[in-house]
Amino acid sequence: TFEPVRTAYEFDQHLRDLTNEALEVVEVDVRTAIAYPFGQAYGAFGHVDSRNFHGTFKHKNWLKRLRKHAEESNEGFVLHFQQVYSEFPNLPIWMLTEIMSFGAISMMFKFMHKRDQRAVGARYGVQAFYLVSWVHHLVYVRNICAHHARLFDRQWAIKPDLPSSNLWAASGLPGNDRLFVTLLILNQLMKKCACLDGFRAAWRNRIAAHVATLPS
């Protein structure tokens, strides 16, 4: 009958909402963790210089898209910068971070120099190689949530690489291609944000309570 279909849909809808809640707070923190030290190291417009990234980065195309975002933005701080400063459509990295997509941030992080990636990884207690993979994966999951697509029992097309430690061993983790690993990654990243301790604990409890209502 239609009723089980509706029940399954509503279960997935709430699961998606819970996942998206954590994605939102983690994204804000990750954006800051990447942009702030980069700005400290290279200055307000360090992202404009391709030498501050790995040589394989298609920097020109990336920067062109960011300039287009700036030109199309109606944000008050962007319009003010355009009126007052000659550098427009280039924006200081701390402004740019506010309007660039999570995917653009992920791309920036992927092609930053290893030493700069390590500084971000240290923020979360994760090796840079794995954190690059995690951020890329979270962008993918965020897009699934944004398009209201199914999360439950979905096999990931973009899977996160996992450290070879007991925390991520197969005995406690069925694999890296299902939602469970995404929830673990979100929880792990939020652990490093002291201001999120209360939210993280409540979020974990709400996830567990919701999964307990899994429809037949």
Image (spheres, helix red, strand yellow):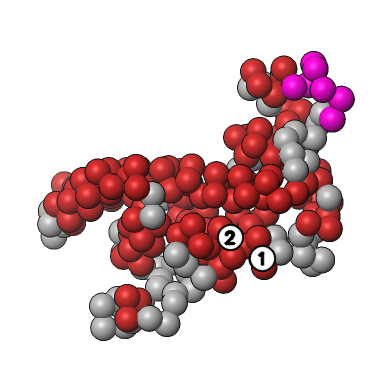
Indicate yes or no whether the magenta region holds residue 85. Answer: yes
167 over 145 or under it: above or below: below
Looking at the rendered structure, the kind of residue marked 1 is Arg
Per the image, the residue denoted by label 1 is 115
Q: Are marks 1 and 2 in contact (CB under 8 Å)?
A: yes
Indicate yes or no whether the magenta region holds residue 145. Answer: no
43 over 69 or under it: above or below: below
Residue 172's quadrant in the figure?
bottom left
* x and y, in percent, of residue 108 in the image: 67, 54
Task: Check disc 1: other Cα within 10 Å, few if <14, some if 14-19, many if 20+.
Answer: few
Q: Can you say which quadrant of the picture contains the C terminus? A: bottom left
Q: Is residue 107 left or right of residue 84?
A: left
Q: Nearer the viewer, residue 57 or 35?
A: 35
Residue that lies at the very extreme toward the right in this rendered image: 86
Residue that lies at the very extreme toward the front in this rendered image: 40
Q: Is residue 101 left or right of residue 166?
A: right
Q: Nearer the viewer, residue 45 or 139?
A: 45
Residue at 72% over, 35% down: 92
Q: Nearer the viewer, residue 191 or 64?
A: 191
Residue 163's quadrant in the figure?
bottom left
Looking at the rendered structure, the kind of residue marked 2 is Ala
* x and y, in percent, of residue 149 in the image: 41, 50
Task: Check disc 2: other Cα within 10 Å, few if <14, some if 14-19, many if 20+.
Answer: some
Q: Which mark is residue 119?
A: 2
Tell me the magenta residue range.
81-87
* x and y, in percent, of residue 157 in the image: 49, 67
Badge 2 marks a residue whose secondary structure is helix
Badge 1 marks a residue whose secondary structure is helix
Q: Is residue 192 left or right of residue 209?
A: right
Residue at 51% over, 62% down: 122
Q: CA distance from mark 1 to mark 2?
A: 7 Å
